[in-house]
Each structure stands twice: as structure tokens, then as C-alpha cells.
């Protein structure tokens, strides 16, 4: 028997498109347009979940995303998604859903024994029970509690599903497509505004679809369809169904989650979800209102629903709810009973605590009455009603509750605003201006009739259009139902037994009363003590009722009690969607040097340097380990010649009559005195006196410099230069631009470097016409490039720069020539060993906490001029014997491996924090000196050359005695460098 | 949060890099006494309300003084340094 509970011909589902799905392994059939909840109800399945704490049988309470009960697991394998609301998940053929938080099955859950012990498991149970001994907290109590806690389970595997992030911009964002939202979007769209209409539901229309009021003499759904048709035809309007606006942020920015492929049997290339950042000049919050239940004993059985949910399932999904008892305290519930009756639903009784309810209806009315209990183990069987004549048991399959409506004002409160208590509506309503660019319209601000919503949406649109400088049209709101809404506040039935407030976290009225009694009487304390409102649904159906019960318990008014804080997200957002594009390579750009292809062809493993990729070493046929390759490459540089791509270093072109003055201000040392055609090493400080970066400064002409930065700090240096220029010397005649990617630059280093470069330079160089630190234009293989006589290896070295489009060819030629001379290419590992042998620093050493004094370069701070960082570099504490200073370290046993990150101690001192004397920043094995070498910082290190210290790396278990030496290990006089 | 770059118009906060208070523009004389440099480098107000601070627009290289309210998060003005 399939779809036994479907009313023939009724609903907005597509009966021509049946879908087959399963729940807990059993196959069912539904129709396109069904949610999992409605499709299960259509098949007579009321039991959908077990509650969080007491494992009580639960059905569906709502027909919307606020659902606290019917959370299920959907999808399988690594995409298994727990805690999906059955009221949100649309059914499609092949959907497999599972109930959760039960064992062994949903019908027979052994953990339901918790319900028997409920009286011991009240709020605060954990805090009171698992106190002693403290040693048990982490080892015994927490693991045991964690095993018992939680609802669904994740797969434990990485989610390989596709997610996306996107930006959207509009004049007007309309949140919610009920009567107010549709009217607002229509009016703004007609006036020419760029409009985004976002609606959480798959189908737009809001309560027009469920309540089916008459609008413009037509059924509500027909009017909605016509408006949506007109909106869809407007090029300036974007309709976004299945999109929940999840958060309000500063500056008119909104977060929104779109369910893109979660409802499709075959999503193809579509992502599962897309996280939107919507920037809107104005916004209208027309998110409607959420109905709230009444707390009465055993109000949580499958079959107990909100009145609005029953209406929705009947009208939208054609579900037959069986005999229905309606328990409400407001006119909307009474009107719903009338509408349901007209739709053929049998109302077995209308129960209202108000004394003055009219009794002349087509169904029995119980004024001054209340529901005091329910029966039915896995589904509602009958309802106990206490009325003037006594207590009656009414047989019913559905109990529909309505304790009134709470405006959906969450987004209005996301920037810290607090709502007002409206005693007439017995609800919180938003204040004006809580989110600067947003207006609240319709039921979201307590306008509950259809006519009022339409008029309010129109008024909000007109106000927004005028703010946007657009001319509002002459639209008028269509005629519609306009019944007044009256309510008598009624929160909980006083009849003993447990009455649920928060269905999702199993919080009852007794828990809230206990909280108040034990002193947790502030609303934020009550929330944390009872966990009310802390489940995935964030208490959407329970918060207001819970604080009303708290207010009653403390004797304060609701307005004085106040609400807890509303924070984004309004609905759960999957981490996968928020992190879309951030997994693995994600959207990170890859910066590739011009030699990249050839390096990879040569088998070089590439390592990341910021966004750049650089070759680590170039293995040859007989080499097994990276160290073999690295040692060989170092030896090539020291004994013949080798080539390295250094294009990733930042290059900044600085020009203008004041360029030298500007560079003097940036660098500690003088650059104005640099002659055209010469290069100088330079040091930059931060204004606080610490080293920012180092590099070379080449003067190509009187008013033209090219400076280099380290690869890592290129962006920071550019930002710094922009700041210094714009903040302190905006009127100087100097301009600069990053040219890092315009030039490919290669280092050629080794005793045979000159021999090699002269093979490809049009004009050969010699020691006289191109001495150490010379620079200038050069014709390289017929291309106009630049030549620099600089070295980062300590050997005779040149750097050749050509426009980037010639880089690949030049690199290939240089490597070929070098190989013919007994050399080759070298990578980052060799480059690192070469510079350690020479004591040259990188950002391993200038890591942000060292001063020029620390690295032995205090003398580079020119006394004759000001520069950034000069004043602070003289501060007490930034120089002196107490500072940790750059030193070289050589293990006494040369083959004993040492490690960066190790700490230094006096030879006989224990390796404890208080005896720490310094640390190691870089290490490498030097084939030149046949020893491990290290650079590091040692307290008063320059005075301690020759001393033996203990190097200890607690992480790697390394303990090695090292001799402290001068940081320049190789060729300290620099004879090789100068050639 | 959005900042109106004087060069590029209103842009998302992600395009900007924050430096600190606009007091950083009032660089003391190189020979000013140490306490003055200390105050310049390290001592900052922490106002509840209107504040002026420095932001860099990574996209165009403009340094901007942004006047904003730390209570309401309103961005009141954004002026280029140069």
C-alpha cells in the first residue's frame, strides 16, 4: 500500500512524477514537490526520529526549516550528512534516508531506558553527577558522555563533494518570498531596481501556499504564480529559491546558503551547495513568522504538530492528517480549524484556553480548556482535554498546537540589536534601524494578515526605492484576507507530567523552573544550564516560550527577562560550503617561473615558496637520495659553474629625480651615494627597529633603480614602500612598480661563471669592465637584458635578466652550457647550503624579532641620514650583550646531524627553559667543509666564538655538542666572491 | 564590512590589509626623545566610537585613512593618503 494518507487531487505536488526513495531501508513512493517529511506522512509514517536525551519517539513538528524533531541522515559514503531536517530535504528517486540516535532500530530503541530515569536526568545532571574525582573528568566521564551524546554521525572521511562560493550584488535584497516579499520584489522590479529575491523553500509563495487565502479574488497560490511569472521575466530580478539568508554583516553584506544539487537524483556537474555573499544597497526582511507550540504534558508524540504545519501538509502536499484536535490560544488557530474543515479534514475538537471563544462552529469547541495529556506509544492515539465539563479523551491521529506566532526577526538582530516585546502580539518584534540598510516587512514585524503583509511589503519597497534614488511605481496592494489577530498569552499547561519546550534538546518546563530555582535565572544562564535553544535548530520553536516560563518562575515580566543573543548563521551552514575553494590547491593561484617546465622535465621535485614553485634539486641517474643531488650541486658551484632561477625574488623598479632620496629613507644604508652602474646590498627595517627585509639595490641610471626583495617578503615590502611614499613623501618626484613577473633572472655561479656568460653575451665581460657589484644593460643572445655582478653563493657570480618571454630559452641555454663545462642546474637545497656556508641570511634568520645589531649589521645604519626604523633601533634593549646574536655552529663530530628549531644551552647546563641560551634557525650539510653547519642566535654570541654549546632538539631527540664560530664558514675574506 | 576605496569604489574587506591607527602618520622628528618615539610606536587609544585607521587596498596600492565607528561598525569616511 503506497501513499495511503494522500487526499486525492489535493496539493501542489506533481502527481505525474512519482519518486521512489527509502527510509531506514524500506522503500516508499512520493511525488515531485514532496519533502522527505511530507512523503513519509503520505505513507502513514509518523515516527521519524528519537529525541536527543530521553530517546523518545518523535515525528515531525513543523513543515519548515525550523524543525526540531525530524532530523535524519541522508546520502551515503563520504557524503553522509547527519541532522538533515526531513522538512527541508526534498525527495528524489534514489534518495536513501536513515533515522539516527537509536539502537537497534527506530521502533525499538534500547536507549529509551533514559526516559524511565528522566527524573535523575534533569537539567544540571552532568554538572552535579560527574564532579568527583577530578582525575575522572578526562579519562572516564568525558569519553563515556561523548559516546552517549550526539545525534547523527559523520562518515569520518573527507567530503569529496563539490561546493561553491559566489558573490552577488544588487540594489535590493528581498529575504523571503511570502506575500510581503513577493509584493516588495514586484514593486521594486517594476521600478527598475536590481533585485534578488531569496527564499529558503524550494517553492516561492510562503504562507500563500499553505493557508491559501484569497488574493485579488484568486486563490493565494495562483496569485503567487502570476507574480513569480512576471518577476521571472524581468532581467533585473534574480529569483533564488532554496536559498537561506544565513547572516547579516556590516556594510550591507549578507551570507546565504543555496541548496543547489541536494534535491537532484543526478546533480551532474552541479555543486551540492553554494555559499553566497550578497552585497545589497538595501534589504527587506520579509521572512514571515514561526509558529510556536504550547507546552503541555506529553506534547512530543509523533502526530503532534504545529497548526501551520498541518495546514501546510494538507494544502501543499495533500496529506490526510486523520482526526485532528486543534489546541490554540489565538485567532489564527481558530481560522485554521475552519479552513481545514472546509478542506475536508475532520476536526475532532478545537481547544482554547480563552473563555470567550465562539462555540458555534462546524466542529466541537472547548473554550476555557486545555490539553492535559496524550497517549499512543509510537504515534498519537488520543488527546486528554480538560474543559468545563471535566476531562475528555478525544481520539485523534493529529494534535495541532498553536501558542501564537514569533516574527522571524533573527537577521534583524545579527548586528547586536535587541527586539521589543509586543504585549498585544505576545511576541518580540524588531525595532526600526537594527540593521542600517534593512527594513522589516510583513509578518516578520508582526503584521499577520495577508492584506497587511501585502501593503507592508509594498510600503517597504517604496521606501527602499526612494533610498536608492529610483522612482516608485503606482502599484497598489491587491485586496486580500484581512482578519484581525488576537491572542491571549498562554505558554504551558499546569497539569503535572513533563511538558516539552525544546524538543530538539529535550528541555521541559521543569528544567527551566529548576534552573530558576537553582539561581540560573538570567536568560543567558538558563540557556546554558538547561541547553534550551542550543540544538541544531537553535530553539526556533522554543526560545520565546522558554523565556516566558522562566519569567513566570522568576516573577519578572518577559520584557525584563529579555532574549538570548541572535547570532549568525540563522540556519546550519555546512563547513564544506563555507570552505569551498579552500581544500587542497583550491583557488590558490600558482606562480610558475619561466623555467618551471624544464625544471619538471629534469625531474626536479618542486617546493612551494609562497605562491611560487621552485625546484628543490635536479636528480641525476645515479643519485638515490636528495642529499646526493644537493651535495653534487653545491660542489658544482664551488668547483665549476651552475645555474639557478632567481626570478621569484621581488623586483621593484624605482624611478624619478627623488628616487635616491626615497631609497635613502627606506634603506638603513645610503643609496644616494651609489654610482650608476653599481649595485649595493641593502637592509630595510620596520619602524619599530626590527629587520624587515634585505636585498640588492642596482642603480641603472641617475634616476633609475631596480631593487630586489626576498621571495617571501615581496608583497610586504611593496606595501611598506607604498605606505612610506604616500604617508611621508607624497610630494617627492618618485614612482615605483613591481616588475617581478616582467623579468626572468638567472644566477650563474662558480669559478667558471665568467667563461660561461661570455659564451652568450654579445660584449664579453672581464674583471676590469664589469667588476664585483657592477650592473648594466647587456645584449644576451640578441635580446636586450640586464647583467648584474652579484652573488648569493659566495662564488664568482653573475645574474642575467631578460624579459620574461625569453626566460625559458635562456635557462635552457645556460643549463646546456653549464653541463658542457662540468656543471649544471642547482635548486633550492643547494642554494640554501651555499648561503649557509657563507653566513648569508634569509627569513629563517630575519624572522621579525631580530634587529640589525643581532645580525651584526648595526654598522649598516647610516649615521648621516634618517631612515625608517633608525630611531627605534637605538632603543635600550635592542642592542647589547643580552641580545641573542647571529652565530655559526659546527658540530664537534662533523657528521652529527643537527636541526633547525633546536635550542642552545651551555655545555653543562640542563636543557630547560630557564637555561635557554638561543636557538638554531638554519642547518645544512656542507660538502665543501665536510661537516654539518648551522646558523642560529646565541645570547651574546659574537663574544663567544670558540665556545662549545649543547644543541638540543627535544622534538627529534637530537643532542649534539657544537662549537660557536663566525657565521661565515667559507671564504671569510671573500676572495672568491670578488673573483 | 566594505570600504570605499577612493580609487576603486566600494570593495569587500577581504581586498584590504589593516595596519593600525592613523596616529602612525604623525612620525616624530628623528631626534625626538625616546618617550615620544615610544608613544608613537606602541601607545594607542582604544576608543568605543569614532576611530581613524589605516588600510591598504591590495588591488590598487592605495593607503587609506578610514574613519569608522567601533560600536556601530559604520564606515564614515575613507580618504586616500596621497
Image (cartoon, coloured by chain):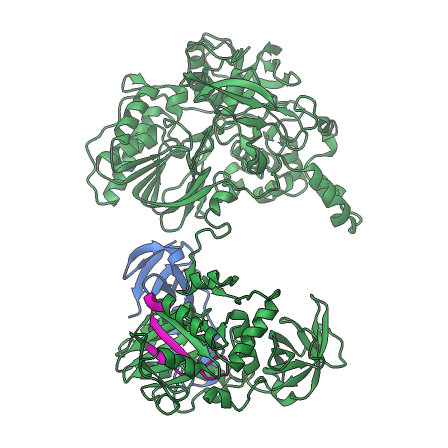
Chain colours: A green, B blue
Q: In this view, does A440 lie to the left or right of A337?
A: left
Q: Is residue A437 left or right of residue A352?
A: left
Is residue A840 something that shows in the picture?
A: no
Q: Which residue is drawn at 67% across and 29% down?
A: A102
Q: Which of A321 and A665 is in front in this view?
A: A665
Q: Where is residue A36 in the image (x, y as percent from the top left)?
A: 51, 24
Q: Nearer the viewer, residue A488 or A119?
A: A119
Q: Which of A35 and B19 is in front in this view?
A: A35
A222 over A840 or under it: above or below: above
Q: Position of residue A337 (x, y in %)?
A: 46, 15
The residue furthest front is A820
The residue furthest right is A133
Q: Position of residue A562 (x, y in %)?
A: 51, 41
Quadrant of residue A699 within the rendered picture:
bottom left
Is residue A176 something that shows in the picture?
A: yes
- Within the magenta stretch, is there residue A454? no
A808 over A549 or under it: above or below: below
Q: Position of residue A297 (x, y in %)?
A: 63, 23
Q: Give the range drawn in magenta.
A: A786-807
Where, quadrant-wise, is the N terminus of chain A in this rendering?
A: top right
The mark total stands at 0
- Within the magenta stretch, is there residue A792? yes
Q: Nearer the viewer, residue A962 or A318?
A: A962
B6 over A841 or under it: above or below: above
Amino acid at each position: 500500500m503506497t501513499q495511503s494518507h494522500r487526499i486525492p487531487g489535493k496539493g501542489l505536488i506533481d502527481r505525474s512524477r512519482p519518486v521512489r526513495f527509502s527510509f531506514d531501508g524500506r522503500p516508499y513512493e512520493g511525488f515531485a514537490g514532496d519533502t522527505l517529511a511530507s512523503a513519509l506522512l503520505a505513507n502513514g509514517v509518523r515516527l521519524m526520529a528519537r529525541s536527543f536525551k530521553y530517546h523518545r519517539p518523535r515525528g515531525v513538528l513543523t513543515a519548515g526549516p525550523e524543525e526540531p524533531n525530524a532530523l535524519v541522515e541522508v546520502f551515503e559514503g563520504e557524503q553522509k550528512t547527519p541532522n538533515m531536517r526531513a522538512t527541508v530535504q526534498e525527495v528524489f528517486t534514489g534518495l536513501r534516508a536513515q533515522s539516527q540516535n537509536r539502537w537497534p532500530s527506530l521502533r525499538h530503541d534500547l536507549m529509551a531506558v533514559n526516559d524511565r530515569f528522566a527524573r535523575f536526568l534533569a537539567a544540571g545532571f552532568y554538572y552535579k553527577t560527574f564532579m568527583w574525582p577530578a582525575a575522572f573528568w578526562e579519562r572516564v566521564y568525558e569519553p563515556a558522555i561523548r559516546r552517549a551524546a550526539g545525534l547523527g554521525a559523520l562518515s569520518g572521511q573527507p567530503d569529496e563533494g563539490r561546493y561553491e562560493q559566489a558573490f552577488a550584488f544588487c540594489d535590493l535584497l528581498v529575504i523571503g518570498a511570502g506575500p510581503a516579499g513577493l509584493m516588495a520584489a514586484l514593486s521594486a522590479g517594476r521600478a527598475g531596481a536590481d533585485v534578488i529575491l531569496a527564499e529558503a523553500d524550494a517553492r516561492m509563495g510562503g504562507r500563500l501556499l499553505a493557508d491559501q487565502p484569497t488574493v485579488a479574488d484568486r486563490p493565494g497560490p495562483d496569485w503567487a504564480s502570476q507574480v513569480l511569472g512576471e518577476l521571472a521575466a524581468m532581467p533585473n530580478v534574480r529569483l533564488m529559491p532554496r536559498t537561506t539568508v544565513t547572516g547579516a554583516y556590516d556594510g550591507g553584506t549578507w551570507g546565504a546558503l543555496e541548496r543547489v544539487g541536494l534535491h537532484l537524483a543526478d546533480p551532474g556537474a552541479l555543486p551540492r551547495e553554494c555559499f553566497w555573499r550578497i552585497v545589497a544597497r538595501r534589504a527587506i526582511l520579509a521572512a514571515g513568522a514561526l509558529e510556536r507550540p504550547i507546552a503541555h504534558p506529553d506534547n512530543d508524540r509523533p502526530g503532534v504538530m504545529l497548526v501551520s504545519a498541518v495546514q501546510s501538509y494538507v494544502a501543499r502536499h495533500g496529506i490526510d492528517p486523520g482526526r485532528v484536535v486543534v489546541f490554540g490560544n489565538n485567532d489564527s488557530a481558530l481560522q485554521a480549524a475552519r479552513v481545514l474543515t472546509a478542506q475536508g479534514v475532520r476536526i475532532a475538537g478545537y481547544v482554547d484556553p480563552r473563555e470567550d471563544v465562539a462555540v458555534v462552529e462546524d466542529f466541537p469547541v472547548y473554550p476555557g480548556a486545555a490539553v492535559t495529556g496524550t497517549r499512543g506509544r509510537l504515534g498519537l492515539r488520543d488527546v486528554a482535554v480538560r474543559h468545563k465539563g471535566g476531562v475528555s479523551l478525544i481520539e485523534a491521529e493529529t494534535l495541532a498546537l498553536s501558542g501564537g506566532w514569533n516574527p522571524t526577526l533573527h537577521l534583524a538582530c545579527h548586528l547586536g540589536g535587541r527586539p521589543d516585546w509586543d504585549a498585544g502580539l505576545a511576541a518580540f518584534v524588531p525595532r526600526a534601524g537594527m540593521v542600517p540598510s534593512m527594513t522589516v516587512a510583513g509578518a516578520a514585524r508582526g503584521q499577520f494578515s495577508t492584506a497587511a503583509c501585502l501593503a507592508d511589503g509594498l510600503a517597504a519597497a517604496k521606501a527602499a526605492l526612494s533610498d536608492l534614488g529610483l522612482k516608485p511605481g503606482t502599484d497598489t496592494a491587491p485586496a486580500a484576507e484581512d482578519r484581525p489577530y488576537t491572542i491571549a498569552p498562554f505558554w504551558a499547561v499546569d497539569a503535572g507530567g513533563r511538558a516539552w519546550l525544546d524538543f530538539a534538546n529535550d528541555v521541559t518546563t521543569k528544567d527551566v523552573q529548576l534552573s530558576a530555582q537553582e539561581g540560573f535565572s538570567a536568560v543567558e544562564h538558563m540557556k546554558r544550564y538547561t541547553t534550551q535553544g542550543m540544538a541544531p535548530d537553535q530553539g526556533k520553536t522554543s526560545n520565546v516560550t522558554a523565556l516566558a516560563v522562566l519569567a513566570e518562575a522568576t516573577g519578572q515580566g518577559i520584557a525584563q527577562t529579555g532574549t538570548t543573543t541572535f547570532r549568525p548563521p540563522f540556519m546550519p551552514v555546512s563547513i564544506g560550503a563555507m570552505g569551498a575553494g579552500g581544500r587542497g590547491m583550491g583557488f590558490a593561484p600558482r606562480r610558475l617561473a619561466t623555467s618551471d617546465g624544464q625544471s619538471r622535465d629534469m625531474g626536479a621535485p618542486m617546493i612551494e615558496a609562497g605562491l611560487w614553485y621552485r625546484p628543490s634539486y635536479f636528480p641525476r641517474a645515479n643519485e638515490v637520495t636528495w642529499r646526493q643531488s644537493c651535495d653534487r650541486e653545491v660542489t658544482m658551484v664551488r668547483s665549476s659553474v651552475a645555474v639557478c632561477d632567481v626570478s621569484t625574488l621581488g623586483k621593484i623598479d624605482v624611478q624619478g629625480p627623488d628616487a635616491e632620496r626615497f631609497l635613502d629613507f627606506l634603506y638603513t644604508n645610503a643609496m644616494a651615494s651609489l654610482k650608476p652602474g653599481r649595485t649595493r646590498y641593502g637592509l630595510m627595517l620596520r619602524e619599530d627597529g626590527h629587520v624587515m627585509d634585505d636585498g640588492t639595490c642596482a642603480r641603472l641610471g641617475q634616476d633609475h633603480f631596480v631593487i630586489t626583495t626576498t621571495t617571501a617578503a615581496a608583497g610586504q615590502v611593496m606595501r611598506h614602500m607604498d605606505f612610506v611614499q604616500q604617508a611621508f613623501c607624497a610630494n617627492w618626484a618618485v614612482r615605483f612598480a613591481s616588475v617581478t613577473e616582467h623579468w626572468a633572472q638567472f644566477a650563474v655561479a662558480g669559478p667558471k661563471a665568467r667563461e660561461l656568460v661570455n659564451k652568450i653575451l654579445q660584449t664579453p665581460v672581464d674583471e676590469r669592465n664589469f667588476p664585483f657589484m657592477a650592473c648594466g644593460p647587456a645584449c644576451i643572445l640578441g635580446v636586450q637584458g640586464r647583467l648584474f655582478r652579484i652573488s648569493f653563493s659566495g662564488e664568482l657570480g653573475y645574474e642575467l635578466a631578460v624579459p620574461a618571454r625569453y626566460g625559458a630559452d635562456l635557462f635552457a641555454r645556460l643549463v646546456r652550457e653549464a653541463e658542457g663545462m662540468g656543471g649544471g642546474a642547482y635548486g633550492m637545497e643547494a642554494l640554501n647550503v651555499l648561503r649557509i656556508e657563507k653566513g648569508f641570511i634569509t627569513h629563517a634568520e630575519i624572522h621579525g624579532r631580530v634587529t640589525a645589531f643581532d645580525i651584526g649589521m648595526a654598522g649598516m645604519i647610516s649615521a648621516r641620514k634618517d631612515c625608517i626604523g633608525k630611531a627605534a633601533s637605538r632603543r635600550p634593549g635592542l642592542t647589547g650583550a643580552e641580545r641573542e646574536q647571529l652565530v655559526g655552529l659546527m658540530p664537534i663530530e662533523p657528521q652529527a646531524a643537527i636541526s633547525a628549531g633546536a635550542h642552545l644551552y651551555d655545555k653543562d647546563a640542563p636543557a630547560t627553559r630557564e637555561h635557554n641560551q638561543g636557538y638554531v634557525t638554519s642547518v645544512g650539510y656542507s660538502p665543501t667543509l665536510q661537516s654539518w653547519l648551522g646558523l642560529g642566535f646565541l645570547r651574546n654570541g659574537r663574544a663567544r666564538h670558540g665556545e662549545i654549546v649543547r644543541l638540543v632538539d627535544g622534538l627529534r631527540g637530537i643532542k649534539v655538542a657544537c662549537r660557536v664560530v663566525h657565521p661565515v664558514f667559507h671564504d671569510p675574506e671573500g676572495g672568491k666572491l670578488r673573483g | 564590512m566594505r570600504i570605499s576605496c577612493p580609487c576603486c569604489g566600494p570593495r569587500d574587506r577581504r581586498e584590504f590589509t589593516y595596519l593600525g591607527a592613523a596616529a602612525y602618520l604623525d612620525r616624530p622628528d628623528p631626534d625626538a626623545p625616546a618617550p615620544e618615539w615610544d608613544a608613537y610606536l606602541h601607545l594607542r587609544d582604544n576608543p568605543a566610537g569614532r576611530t581613524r585607521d589605516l588600510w591598504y587596498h591590495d588591488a590598487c596600492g592605495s593607503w587609506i585613512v578610514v574613519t569608522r565607528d567601533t560600536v556601530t561598525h559604520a564606515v564614515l569616511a575613507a580618504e586616500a593618503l596621497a
